[in-house]
Amino acid sequence: MRRSMSWALPTTVLLVLAASGCAPEGSGGGENADGGSITVAYQKTSAYTQVDALMQQAKEDFEAANPGVTVNLEPIEAEENDYATKLSLMQRSPDTAPDVFYEDSFRVRPDAEAGYLLPLDDYLAEWEDWDTGFIESAKQAGLGSDGKTYAVPMGTDTRALWYNKVVFEEAGLPIPWEPQTWEDILAAAKAVKAADPDAVPFNIYSGTGMGEAASMQGFEMLLYGTDDTLYDTDEGKWIVGSQGFKDSLQFISDIYVGGLGPDVATALDSTYYQQLNGEWYPENKVGASIDGSWIAGNWLEDGPTPWPEWSEVMGVTPMPTQDGGEPGATSMSGGWTLAVGAGTQDPDLAFDFISTALNKDNSLSYNVNASQVPVRSDVAEDPAFTESSPVSGFFSDLVEVTHYRPTTSDYAEISGNIQQAMEAVMTGEQSVDEAAAAYDEAVTSLVGEENVSRG
């Protein structure tokens, strides 16, 4: 929700820079800046304040390096889907198109194709940090279909199973918990329900209210643990009619229709994750959930919902593949980026702000506070990061088994179709076969029969 909840993030951030005055050359303009103002607008929710802290620090640093330039911060209170809608509307008009914005990595390629983003290759070639600090594989997050770089990554993430040890012990479940198959997860959920009928046995984000969190860290965490995927990258075709897709929907049905998840109405609320992680886990009212590496950031001393005991109460374990097949575990990764709008009147100043926000010190602070997997090698190796959390190494290691969403221009709409299929089965409005068939029809209609592959 970040992200993506990307939950990607798994929550999102928009930066809008409207700059005037003389622009500095390269990064860190210093005395070359002569007046002007920069407006930075971004998403801020009660459950995710870490990007706000980053922007506050970047404002201070940028103004110190650019005398006469003022950075105006304008937080936008909106959940992920609303943010994406507002950003899309802003990009359609030169009068409102942002100069710099925070972008989920899966949107970089389609937005570049739509002409919303400025290529950054010339700036990156002169930014020493790009070659010496950033991990090579992480740079792929900012690539367009033409091979140019349109965005700079802020961090990445992985996903796994979080579980409450207190709840599990009361249910007679083993600690550490090491499920090997989906059936092991369902069995644990049933044990939790039997021991405490008032607790949420298992949470998996699902339905349109949760947006990309449902698609990525709900459905795709299941699908990519089967023998199937969403997209055939070799053929350049979307996969329809696969057994893995149906099996993933069946798991959603087993949780929700089977009474092993949260109340459906609650789960469809876009702010549900705040209640889940901010209240119910600390109150020992949740058994386990599929969630991201970042959620521990909620519980830190300076996080939105401090929980000093979290590291003792909460456990983490990899998400198993469907039947325990190789490699035995699976994960999904995304991440967020900063990009420059194609219509910016001052690209030099805009890129300078990005290079300030994502320098080593600011990236280190953000990755620690937001519990992100670093995309800078110098941050990943810094003791301030490696010793910051008892789970940082666990989530970093999951990169070995992780997967990434398709970066095609039509993914966002197909993601919406996934959410609709999930919602149809979680509410019982459609059977698994009916929901899968509706998804197949929607995808085929969107991309054309020639661009689908029958599973």
Image (cartoon, grey):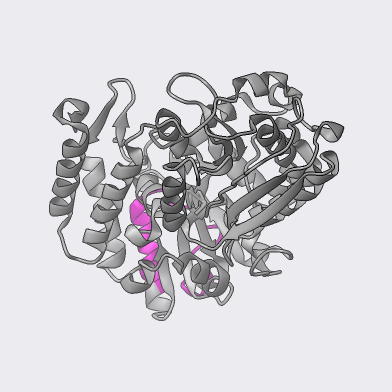
Q: Is residue 219 left or right of residue 388?
A: left
Q: Is residue 369 left or right of residue 325?
A: right
Q: Is residue 241 visible?
A: no
- Residue at coordinates 34% horizontally, 38% vertically from top-left? 411
Measured from the top left, where is residue 315 in percent x and y? 58, 59
Nearest the viewer among 13 and 98 is: 98
The stretch drawn in magenta includes residue 425: no
Nearest the viewer among 199 and 177 is: 199
The stretch drawn in magenta includes residue 170: yes
Measured from the top left, where is residue 290 in percent x and y? 45, 55
Q: Is residue 402 left or right of residue 367?
A: left
Q: Quadrant of residue 304?
A: bottom right
Q: Quadrant of residue 22?
A: top right
Magenta span of residues: 168-192
Total numbered labels placed on residues in the image: 0
Measured from the top left, where is residue 167 in percent x and y? 51, 72
- Residue at coordinates 41% horizontally, 55% vertically from top-left? 81
| Position above or below: 179 against 401 | below
Measured from the top left, where is residue 249 in percent x and y? 25, 52
Q: Is residue 272 visible?
A: yes
Q: Quadrant of residue 353?
A: top right
| Position above or below: 249 against 406 | below
Q: Is residue 102 left or right of residue 441?
A: right
- Residue at coordinates 47% horizontally, 25% vertically from top-left? 144
Nearest the viewer among 64 and 133 is: 64
**Which image quarter holds the C terminus?**
top left
